Image (cartoon, rainbow, N blue to C red):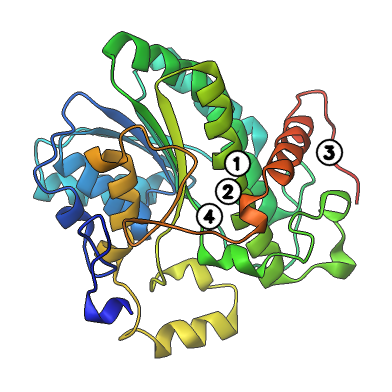
Amino acid sequence: MWIFGWKGPSGYSARSTAEEVTQGIDGTGFTAIVTGASSGIGAETTRVLALRGVHVIMAVRNVDAGRSVKEAILKELPSAKIDVMELDLSSMASVRKFVLDYQSSALPLNLLINNAGVLAGPFALSQDNIELQFATNHIGHFLLTNLLLETMKKTSQESNAEGRVVNVSSWGHHFAYREGICFEKINNESEYNTIQAYGQSKLANILHANELARRLKEEGVQITANSLHPGAIVTNIARHHSILNVFSNLGKFFVKNVAQGAATTCYAALHPQVKGISGEYFVDSNKAKASSLAQDAELGRKLWDFSTSLTDPKQLGCSA
């Protein structure tokens, strides 16, 4: 139990904060993109990476909120290098525009933190006619990652520094539908369950990281891909689900704060202990075991092909 602060092999526990797990690490010269950086663990991840010298690009849907977070961080850390760029992960057009704008900036890219997410909302379709949780939590990040990979490869080659892709998943992946990913029924409103749909999208985050890791290893490039569960954290992500809100409010003394919640993300992004490690799932800044579905390589390959078809510019949407 994390409240006792039991440390794992890494030397860290669930009580460790993002600042603690990155203590003494110099990220100067690194550039990172953090999605969903305008609140919660995304904002704290941005702050701590900037504290360690990383140039952070906050990829946010609400630019005004992102700028407010940037200003707050700059008051604390006047020398921090932070930029804010607009990104709506539920829109493939927005993802493509973001990448084009990023590439036009000629910035390098060492770290891609796929952090943004929505949780347990009512059934809705994205602009691309894909169930909203799956579209935002997985498809948007899948497309973003694929489009940015060449920039990451170039950066890694030129700097001889390892690139890292970090997918923020959730223990909630255990609550996915029985088959894991409902490929044929992604948009089936009649069988939609808010929690299971969230679990499906978080399962997809892990499968995506695992399959990406396999492909990067095959290619022999110096880029790793891992996924993680940040812990139970009190943030506004549960705003659409009354039951989760109740438990969140009742459990404030038993869950992580935001500084602890961002720890595993910052650990996976920066810590030397993670160098060369790819295709792993982390909890409390330690390697952990995901569900059996999350370790299913065939399911991961099928998801990759399915996601590729959905993100094909010629694809007009998916069927119910």
Q: State how far apart marks 4 and 1 are (Cα).
A: 15 Å
Q: SS at mark 4?
A: loop
Of labels 2 and 4, earlier in sequence is 4
Which mark identifies residue 5?
none
Give the label, 4 or 1, closer to the camera. Answer: 1
* Numbered label attached to residue 205: 2
The amino acid on which the numbered mark 1 sits, given as a three-letter code, is His
**Residue shown at 51% from the left, 25% from the top:** 217
- Kindly check if marks 2 and 3 are in contact, taking CB atoms under 8 A apart as contact: no
Q: In the image, what residue type sits under mark 3?
A: Gly
The disc labelled 2 sits on which kind of residue? Asn
Q: Are marks 2 and 4 in contact (CB under 8 Å)?
A: no
| Rendering quarter of residue 41 | bottom left
Within 10 Å of the Cα at label 3, are there few (<14), some (14-19), or many (20+) other Cα atoms?
Answer: some
Q: Quadrant of the N terminus?
A: bottom left
Task: Please say if the residues under marks 2 and 1 sit with CB atoms less than 8 Å apart.
Answer: yes
How many C-alpha atoms fall within 10 Å of the one at disc 4: few (<14), some, or many (≥20)? many
User: Residue 317 — which label?
Assistant: 3
Q: Which percent across, then down, holds residue 261?
A: 33, 63
160 to the left or right of 316: left
CA gap, disc 3 and disc 4: 21 Å
User: What separation in Å lies between label 3 and label 1 (alpha carbons)?
Assistant: 20 Å
Q: Of marks 3 and 1, which one's residue comes earlier in the chain?
A: 1
Q: Circle 4 sits on which residue? A: 117
Of marks 2 and 3, which one's residue comes earlier in the chain?
A: 2
